[in-house]
Amino acid sequence: MQFRDLKQQYQVLKAGMDKAILDAAASGAHIMGPQVQELEKQLADYVGTGHCISCASGTDALTLALKAWDIKRGDAVFVPDFTFFSSAEAVSLEGATPVFVDVDRETFNIDPADLENKIEATIRKGESVPKVIITVDLFGLPANYPAIRRIARNHRLLILEDGAQGFGGSIGGKRNCSFGDISTTSFFPAKPLGCYGDGGACFTDNDEWAALMDSYRMHGKGSSKYENVRIGMNSRLDTIQASILQVKLKAFAEELEAVNKAAAEYTARLADLVETPVVPAGFLSSWAQYTVRLNGKTERDGLQAYLEGQGIPSMVYYPTPLHRQTAYRDSGLPEPDCPVAGRLCETVLSLPMHPYISSEEINRVCNAIEAFLHREKEAGGERSR
């Protein structure tokens, strides 16, 4: 059993994939070939934004957005404490200060109430100026954008949507990667829409920001690549990766339907055994991960070991909140109050999930979980006697 079966996906898409890869190789236009511009238009149309600017990774996409906004030392950027390191790393690389915000225990996304508290505390402290809220559409579920947008408007802050895991999700039909003033995604292979290497993209309706990000991704180019008007970076999406993504994008709607069907099967089987993921009314997840919660770290780690013994892969996303990572723990930043993030790090477990997982495989995973929990209950009963 595969945690995310990219080999099976390739077999399903093989004919179109092989042709796209060979055509890209034969073209000789290996960097910023015509497929890149075609893909950018297709992605912008899918998401519903005026611009898509592709780049070399999801982390670079965050960096391009922050550069377009001139985020720098003295600025405060609000980041959920329960997410992958790059969401905060990009802030620190620009010299700004990440302010860690707790998350909602059910959706795993940034908690609007704590966000409001952290913004007001930052203003009172007066050491940095609030500028940006980085939301993360964790595990495929959109953040609570109606509430976050109200907070951003009240405090005159920009929203940078980190949609690295969220491509394909939506709220009321409005798609992920369209909720931010600038939104980003990642094409890392295991993401909902992934290529065969690294890649990323930025989305915006703002013409000026789009032009700046286009410049920054190619060494700060002006009217040509040999006229450099600002200090930029080298962050371009390879033509062959764009070709791969074009093939996958054609299959994406069907794959999105399949992962939602798989998630529903998991929830139906597991709802009485563990805490299953919550998808609010009107929200659609793209299910980058299917993540359950156990009662504690001992139970979570025990279940993971048991599943491994049964030949079933699982993953812990994420074992350490951002503020406790060594890079930030030793940075002199104040210790934030993020109890939910800390608790989730000890209790979450992600199960195999991809568009090609079968009902038989889901049943196998669920049966193993049920057997483990039954064994633990029986052992607890024996100990109590």
Image: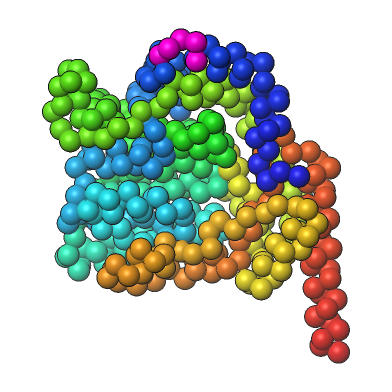
In reply to whether residue 103 is colored magenta, the answer given is no
Q: Which residue is drawn at 32% across and 55% down?
A: 78
Seen in the picture, residue 381 relative to 166 is either above or below; the reply is below
Predominant secondary structure, magenta span = helix
Residue 10 position, x and y percent, is 66, 27
Q: Which residue is drawn at 50% across and 34% down?
A: 197
Residue 136 visible at all = yes
Residue 156 position, x and y percent, is 23, 48
Q: In which quarter of the image is residue 196?
A: top right
Q: In this view, does 29 lie to the left or right of 222?
A: right
Residue 267 visible at all = no
Q: Residue at x 68, y 46 (%)?
A: 3
**Way the structure is coloured:** rainbow
Q: In this view, does 374 lie to the left or right of 77?
A: right
Q: Which residue is drawn at 82% across and 50% down?
A: 364
Magenta range is 25-29
